[in-house]
Image: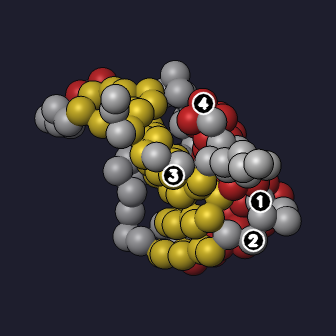
Amino acid sequence: MPTHTRIRMFNTRDTYPDQSLDNDLCQAVRAGHTVYVRGQVGTDFEGNLVGLGDPRAQTEQAMKNVKQLLEEAGSDLSHIVKTTTYITDPRFREPVYCEVGKWLKGVFPISTGLVVAGLAQPQWLMEIDVIAVIPQEEDKS
């Protein structure tokens, strides 16, 4: 019996055709009762960038991706326990964090935020990865 499930497997040669990469990855891993979601950006699962130059719009798309991946893994946004958010400019903090806050209202995860020199593609202005749990039914006996 496998100890984990890989969700939406892909190879980086397809994701980054302009780079000489060949790594087998996945968008999320369900390991036991924990879900680890790969960093999500303003690109949908078909590879289309949403919100060129707009950190809020990119964050909205990233959170749509997070929501979908968690649901595919058997969890949801309310079970996020940790977020890590990366922004490429300190001025993006307010639009990015306000958008994330809309999606995680009442959840109260722990959070780490970083300003970085750049992300894997220059048009990406933000990235967020999350860790969530899968709630277990309580034993009623």
The answer to whether residue 123 is seen in the rendering is: no
Q: Nearer the viewer, mark 1 or mark 2?
A: 2
Q: Is 139 in front, or is 66?
A: 139
Q: Residue at x 39, y 57 (%)?
A: 119
Q: Quadrant of residue 76?
A: top right
Give the CA distance from mark 2 to mark 4. Answer: 22 Å
- Labelled disc at residue 108: 2
Colour scheme used in the picture? Answer: secondary structure
Dot 3 crowding, Cα within 10 Å, few <14, some 14–19, many 20+:
many
- Labelled disc at residue 72: 4
Q: Is residue 7 above or below residue 122?
A: above
The amino acid beneath tag 3 is Thr
* Farthest residue, direction front: 141
Dot 4 crowding, Cα within 10 Å, few <14, some 14–19, many 20+:
some
**To which residue does mark 3 refer?**
34
Give the CA distance from mark 4 to mark 3. Answer: 13 Å
Mark 4 or mark 3: name the one nearer the start of the chain.
Answer: 3
The amino acid beneath tag 1 is Leu
Q: Give the x, y percent position of residue 71.
A: 66, 35
Give the CA distance from mark 1 to mark 4. Answer: 18 Å
Mark 2 or mark 4: name the one nearer the start of the chain.
Answer: 4
Marks 3 and 1: CB-CB under 8 Å?
no
**To which residue does mark 1 refer?**
104
Dot 2 crowding, Cα within 10 Å, few <14, some 14–19, many 20+:
few
Q: Is 100 in front, or is 81?
A: 81
User: Callout 1: helix, strand or loop?
Assistant: loop
Q: Quadrant of residue 6?
A: top left
Q: Give the x, y percent position of residue 70.
A: 61, 41
Q: Is 20 in front, or is 77?
A: 77
Give the CA distance from mark 3 to mark 1. Answer: 18 Å
